[in-house]
Amino acid sequence: MDVRLTTEQRQLRDAAARLADDLGPGSVHDLDDADRVARLEKAVDSTGWRALRSDGASGVEVAIVAEEFGRGLVDVPFLGPALADDLRRHLAADTGPYTIAVFPQPAGAAEATDTRGFRRALALRQDQVLAGRLGEVRPGADLTRRNAEVLEPLEPLGELSPEQVARWSALALVVTCADLLGVARGAHAVACDYAKLRQQYGKTIGSYQAVSHPLAEGLALIEGSVSVLRHAAWAVDELPPAEAIQAALVAKVYTARAARTIGETAVQVHGGIGNTWECLVHVFLRRALTSTELFPASLEEIDLGLS
């Protein structure tokens, strides 16, 4: 495995980063800016990145975009339609635009995520691809993504092979890992910028060990997250399905813990203002917590002796 990004992958990363920096929310109040959201939606839609898998892109390339969009808190759908696209490409019929829905429990009702602007969702139940109309938007902790109920009955669209199911499951885990890594990077950057500016007792707070050490630990967690994510994203297409899922599970457990730690540190670095609505760091932490619960993974699923 060569962990280095190709020239084309670096260009994709830079393009996604520019889009996120230019049109992503720079404050909590920007989340309610309908004009900004409309321009962001138009820009993302014009890139065609929601159909990366249909265009032959690898898991690494989908993860690259997801990471930069997480870092910039991009608040129009990408993760949902990108995963739905990976299901659609295995179906014979042209099934139109979809986001993704998940079944929280085997007997539970499906819930769709990333639903802004979408009317239908795809879901995978065992080897069956199902489609359903979206109902009412459900309140959630994540301020950058909307969830909605999926109305019954669901329409069967086709079946996937066991290998296709496994590789899609690995990709689903990897994309949420990439989002978690991006969120961690974004929260860490905001906290570092604040630590360089905020002064106490005549010195910037970043000069005190109580602040600088947790931020240094966060950087180490980010580097570890990059390593496990790159391997898991590569494994989606290159390793046997069982090994790809194992790599994705390891990455999900690691990146979820890292993103939560970094998000909580970012809140603490901001002190009292970090617990207010106006401070952007809680938006990063909210997104980290919800991405953790989307396609969750636990240590019990990993047999590599991690702790």
Image (tube, helix red, strand yellow):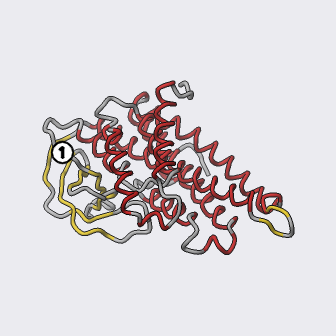
Q: Can residue 70 be seen in this view?
A: yes
In percent of width and height, residue 74 lies at 44, 53
Give the residue displayed 14% in from the left and 45% down from the top.
157
Residue 93: image quadrant is top left
Q: Is residue 298 left or right of residue 281?
A: left
Q: How crowded is mark 1: few (under 14 residues within 10 Å), some or many (20 or more)?
A: few
Give the residue displayed 21% in from the left and 57% down from the top.
119
The amino acid type found where label 1 is placed reads: Gly
- From the image, tell me which residue sits under label 1: 96
In percent of width and height, residue 218 lies at 67, 52
Give the residue displayed 68% in from the left and 48% down from the top.
219
Q: Is residue 110 left or right of residue 4?
A: left
Relative to 106, does residue 60 appear above or below in the rendering? above
Q: Which of 247 and 92 is in front in this view?
A: 92
In percent of width and height, residue 35 lies at 37, 59
Residue 52: image quadrant is top left
Relative to 276, does residue 269 appear above or below in the rendering? above
